[in-house]
Amino acid sequence: MKYEQLARDILELVGGKENVSALTHCVTRLRFKLKDESVAKTEELNKLKGVVTVRQSGGQYQVVIGNHVSEVYKDVCTVGNIATGDSSSDDSGGEKGSPLAQFIDMISNVFIPVLGLLAATGMIKGLTVLATSMGWLSTDSGTYHILNAAGDGLFYFLPVFLGYTAMKKFGGTPFIGMAIAVSLLHPAMSDATAGEPLYTLFAGTIFESPVYITFLGIPVILMNYAQTVIPIVLASYVAAKFEKFCRKTIPSVVRSFLTPFATVLVIVPLTFLFIGPMATWAGDLLGAGALWLHNLSPIVLGVLLGGLWQVLVIFGIHWGLVPIAILNLATQGYCPVMTLQFGASFAQIAAVLVVIMKTKDTEVRALGIPAFISGIFGVTEPAIYGITLPRKKPFIASCIGSAIGGGIMGFFGTQLFAFGGMGIFGFPTRINPETGIDMAWWGAVIAVVVSMVVTFILTWIMYKEDASEEKVTEAPKFEAKPNRQQEVYSPINGTVVELSDVSDPVFGKEVMGKGIAIQPKEGRVVSPINGTIATVFKTKHAIGLIDENGAEILIHVGIDTVQLDGEHFTAYVKEGDTVKVGDLLVEFDIEEIHAAGYETITPVIVTNTANYVDILSTIKGAVSEKEKLMTIIG
């Protein structure tokens, strides 16, 4: 809990955890979906030490933190009892927003979880191409084949990963999305195209398609779904809706296996017959449109995209171009569009360098140096929000430098041959696997150098330090309230289980705090302490309490039972209620929850563990309600 106080301050200023519908994070920012954004105190958040800036875009309330955002995210989830990785679904309760906001929200939630890995494997692929181009590695060697598999494998099987993230976003079971994806990639479907086609559909049009197999007499247009994006995302959306319908209509006694059975049985053929071909054609048209725009004038497009890229980043809408890059890489083997913004991060660090050199403010320099370093590796949000944008002129200079760099890359025909590889790691991803280091690659080098030089000169001329620049005030330090030794009593009749044996790593690895778990024998939860109800989750599967001495207790019935949306749970308390040991909090139906395919093991966690010396289990084996369960050492 290194950032516990910062996490508490952020939660308080966004309107409290009760105002949070969903929370996820990307490379540098916390992405909240708030029930009411007007409640959040944006101005105070902007001044909070540890927060770079705040942006409201794409239906999300984005709190920019910097490179350590993942650590802050975990602490926010811990202090707010928010499930980690919860990007929520359509049922999150937040406002839907405009169609553009919904699109950006969908793209960010589907792609963000795999972007880091895509960048990593893209770097491996780029470095492998560099090694072969320089003659350091033969394409016939085993070393090459293994490195090539490491760099290409994720991209080839990308639909499987997107099946997981898309189903999670749309509120379905992620493994069903993966099952649909692996069906699309099954080698038997590729083998089916051997030999002569039965007949051809849409002959003479751009959609001309040979038919090799049929399904119940209906012609199947076979496509290559490896490396694709749109088909699995659309299939997952339809699958999530159909799965919800099945869960509501199939009897609970057979729901756990009939729901995935029916979903896969219906959606896989539907995807092969309709969703896949239509989505593939739509993707081809989208990619062709991007290439047409590039071919119309690559220099003009380079100037526009290079100059506007950082503005797109500010509003978080640059994610909308990610699918286009993946589509072009899959269909063409290269992307001439997403490469044009390559000089933007280098222009940013040039502007930051000038500010560092000119400033007399040690605090600005202390912020600028790590922003400069992270910008070298392509993470520019700390530079944008912390240094250049607040001072305006350095930001404008960087946009001008990036625009000139984009035009230069358009002139030289620089291409992107592997996804990922930000900052200096982006150079290998722009090496053509066929021709090696050519003038197009040197065009990227020239563009980056020019972007930096132009930005440096313009910033040096335009920027003068303002003596009245407001300094960020230091947040007050958190002082833990001293506590005596106190007892926590069992909220459930059942069997005590070590927390490390819980399958969910959020609990098993004590991310939420120390505690114990109980395998229930009876479907009721009573209060383990004398205190107050802090939180009753809308799905009723989890209760947060605060005892008289300040200990924060979380009782979480089952694993992933949030997916049941409150079904089989009945709550008898609400937030703010005062309770005593033994008061009934929640009842749940063990058999129905098991039939739905979920565990009922119940972690009992002290979420503010960091405030105490230790949390000790006082019992093993069978335990009854109101029997001593844990001792908190203050």
Image: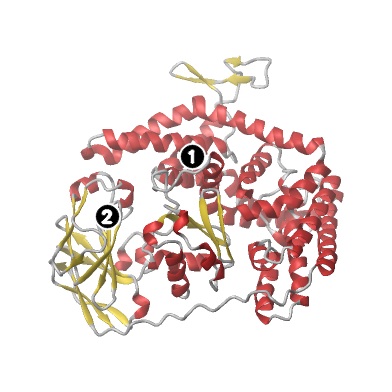
Q: Is residue 578 left or right of residue 386?
A: left
Residue drawn at 82 percent across, 46 percent down: 410
Which one is nearer the viewer's eye here, 69 or 537?
A: 537
Residue at (30% x, 46% y) in the render: 564
SS type, badge 2 = loop
Indicate whether 597 appears above or below 272: below
Quick one: 165 or 626, which is closer to the camera? 626
Depth order, front residue of 407/63: 63
Residue at which label 2 appears: 541
Name the residue: 74% across, 54% down.
Answer: 342
Residue 294 shows in the view:
yes
Q: In whole angstroms, how far apart are the C-alphas of marks 2 and 1?
A: 32 Å
Q: Which mark is residue 182?
A: 1
Q: Give the residue type at disc 2.
A: His
Q: Quadrant of residue 526?
A: bottom left
Residue 188, compared with residue 490, is above or below; it is: above
